[in-house]
């Protein structure tokens, strides 16, 4: 974390020109969101306006705010917000700490009470300068006490990536920039691979000081939470970046970036089963919260890989043994059914139920396990779920909590209280494929000698063989066949559709392997796993890595 020491104010940067600038009729009154701010006489208070601001008020207030901000008058701009005490220091730091001047703000047409705008300005520090530009928006609201039209204050008004308590700064960074490279030495940048932006920021924070580089001059957002990485906005002087080796593969990463962009909300991760090396991570949209690595969601029937491993280990099923797959099944008062209420004929094998994603076949075997904790145990002991993974960046490492009754049953098919992300599911697939958990990593362990998580045992060769047989069947003629048709090599898959409260359409999950690469994807509200998430996984697997 860079120190971001405050530097001296550039003389005269915020002195208004002679004659002053008009900031609108309400520039001298503030109004806090909780009803404070501003003073009025009794006669004035009887005339306080109510209801949404008019178009004229929205235009006048936003113009006054923009004019004051652009002129560097933080006090006047803050008075036009509903949180003067919160707004003024942030607006003042725009010039004092971030050294941003020559500000030009161009508003777009208002949509209701929202006013979009673009900002073009110049960052200047110690004889170096560079342009900065971005788009944001503000909302005009009615002041609770004064009834005046005021800007609804949020830090994002100043910059779309500015969060509560964060600060904009320009100066010499205490953490050198890094040049992250993939496994073959290809340079990885956030411009070419947008999903890697938050990851590269984290790698810089963790490894920048030991990577052999020297500090440059930058403009950045320093988060309130010191554990979070700074967000670099402008580089005025590069310094000398240090080199950081990653396990990523540029080809697989490029494929992952393309694949997720086909959907409004999608995430994918690819790992190498024989080593745990992460080959690709992609999200759309890209946010500071990395959904692919930190998300927590029910993964649907993709978790049947783990449930099948548990049932096989207990000797309750075999890949070629017969199991029941009725349309519906009841367990302790909770009803479960198959998608579209399909069933399979008597004598159908466990492989057929797995490949066709039969929920009831799994539910009807619960009685025989005689252990509600069986799934949580194998999740931790074999698949490494819930252990403290040290990937090199922040991750959520999955959760299969101990439950009883209907909740325990729901876990069998990846619903209920099971929480996973696509990194977890790619790792589960990798473990099933090889039989041994290898903790995913995004930078080599040798970089910092961190202790990697290890599972207490592996799967037997018999269980591994049967799991792979069932996953290969899913990819060949089961629910994953269409998506995996274009994927070559030794391949297997599992589909999932996770029902989420409040959503009309289930989340689409898919996981699969091709040779020594495993990948998992989720598409929010994507429906059946093979329809949306399946093609995302297939595109990444085709890229290899």
Image (spheres, helix red, strand yellow):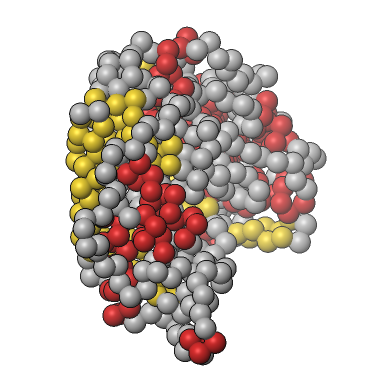
User: Residue visible at 62% across and 42% down?
Assistant: 322
User: Could you tell whether 461 is left or right of 329 in the image?
Assistant: left
User: Residue visible at 30% across and 18% down?
Assistant: 241
Q: Residue furthest front?
A: 18
User: Could you tell whether 226 is left or right of 515 in the image?
Assistant: right
| Residue closest to the eye, 185 or 474 | 185
Residue 67: where, in percent of width, then height?
26, 61
Position above or below: 402 against 443: below
Residue 543: where, in percent of width, then height?
28, 30
Q: Residue furthest right?
A: 370
Residue 492 seen in the figure: no
Residue 27 sits in quarter: bottom left
Position above or below: 487 against 409: above
Residue 188: where, in percent of width, then height?
28, 26
User: Could you tell whether 500 is left or right of 72 in the image?
Assistant: right
Residue 434: where, in percent of width, then height?
51, 21
């Amino acid at each position: 974390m860079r120190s971001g020491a405050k530097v001296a104010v550039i003389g005269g940067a915020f002195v208004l020109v002679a004659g002053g600038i008009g900031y609108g009729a309400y520039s001298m009154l503030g109004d806090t969101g909780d009803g404070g701010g501003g003073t009025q006489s009794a006669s004035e208070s009887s005339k306080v306006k109510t209801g949404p601001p008019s178009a004229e008020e929205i235009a006048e207030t936003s113009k006054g705010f923009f004019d004051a901000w652009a002129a560097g008058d933080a006090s006047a701009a803050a008075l036009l917000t509903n949180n003067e005490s919160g707004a003024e220091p942030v607006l003042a730091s725009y010039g004092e700490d971030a050294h941003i001047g020559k500000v030009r703000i161009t508003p777009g047409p208002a949509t209701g009470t929202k006013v979009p705008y673009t900002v073009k300005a110049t960052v200047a520090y110690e004889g170096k300068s560079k342009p900065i530009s971005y788009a944001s928006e503000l909302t005009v609201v009615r002041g609770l006490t004064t009834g005046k039209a005021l800007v609804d204050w949020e830090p994002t008004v100043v910059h779309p990536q500015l969060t509560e308590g964060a600060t904009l700064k320009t100066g010499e960074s205490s953490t050198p920039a890094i040049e992250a490279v993939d496994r073959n030495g290809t340079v990885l940048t956030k411009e070419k691979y947008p999903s890697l932006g938050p990851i590269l920021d984290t790698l810089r924070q963790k490894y920048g000081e030991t990577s052999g580089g020297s500090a440059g001059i930058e403009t950045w957002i320093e988060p309130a939470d010191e554990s979070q990485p700074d967000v670099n906005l402008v580089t005025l002087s590069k310094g000398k970046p240090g080199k950081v080796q990653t396990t990523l593969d540029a080809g697989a990463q490029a494929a992952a970036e393309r694949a997720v962009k086909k959907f409004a909300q999608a995430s994918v991760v690819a790992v190498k089963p024989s080593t745990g090396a992460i080959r690709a991570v992609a999200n759309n949209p890209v946010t500071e919260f990395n959904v692919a690595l930190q998300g927590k969601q029910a993964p649907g029937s993709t978790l049947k890989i783990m449930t099948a491993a548990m049932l096989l280990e207990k000797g309750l099923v075999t890949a070629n043994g017969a199991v029941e797959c009725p349309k519906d099944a009841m367990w302790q008062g909770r009803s479960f059914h198959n998608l579209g209420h399909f069933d399979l004929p008597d004598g159908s094998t466990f492989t057929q139920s797995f490949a066709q994603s039969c929920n009831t076949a799994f539910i009807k075997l619960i009685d025989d396990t005689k252990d509600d904790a069986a799934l949580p145990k194998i999740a931790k002991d074999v698949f490494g779920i819930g252990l403290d993974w040290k990937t090199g960046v922040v991750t959520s490492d999955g959760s299969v909590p101990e439950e009883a009754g209907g909740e325990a049953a729901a876990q069998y098919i990846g619903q209920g209280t099971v929480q996973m992300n696509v990194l977890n599911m790619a790792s589960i697939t990798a473990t099933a494929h090889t039989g041994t958990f290898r903790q995913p990593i995004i930078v080599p362990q040798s970089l910092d000698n961190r202790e990697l998580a290890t599972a207490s045992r592996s799967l037997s060769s018999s269980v591994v063989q049967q799991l792979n047989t069932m996953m290969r069947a899913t990819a060949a003629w089961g629910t994953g066949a269409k998506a995996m048709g274009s994927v070559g090599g030794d391949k297997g898959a599992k589909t999932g559709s996770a029902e989420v409260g409040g959503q009309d359409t289930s989340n689409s999950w898919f996981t699969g392997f091709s040779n020594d690469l495993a990948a998992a994807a989720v598409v929010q509200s994507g429906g059946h796993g093979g329809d949306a998430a399946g093609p995302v996984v297939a595109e990444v697997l085709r890229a290899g890595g």
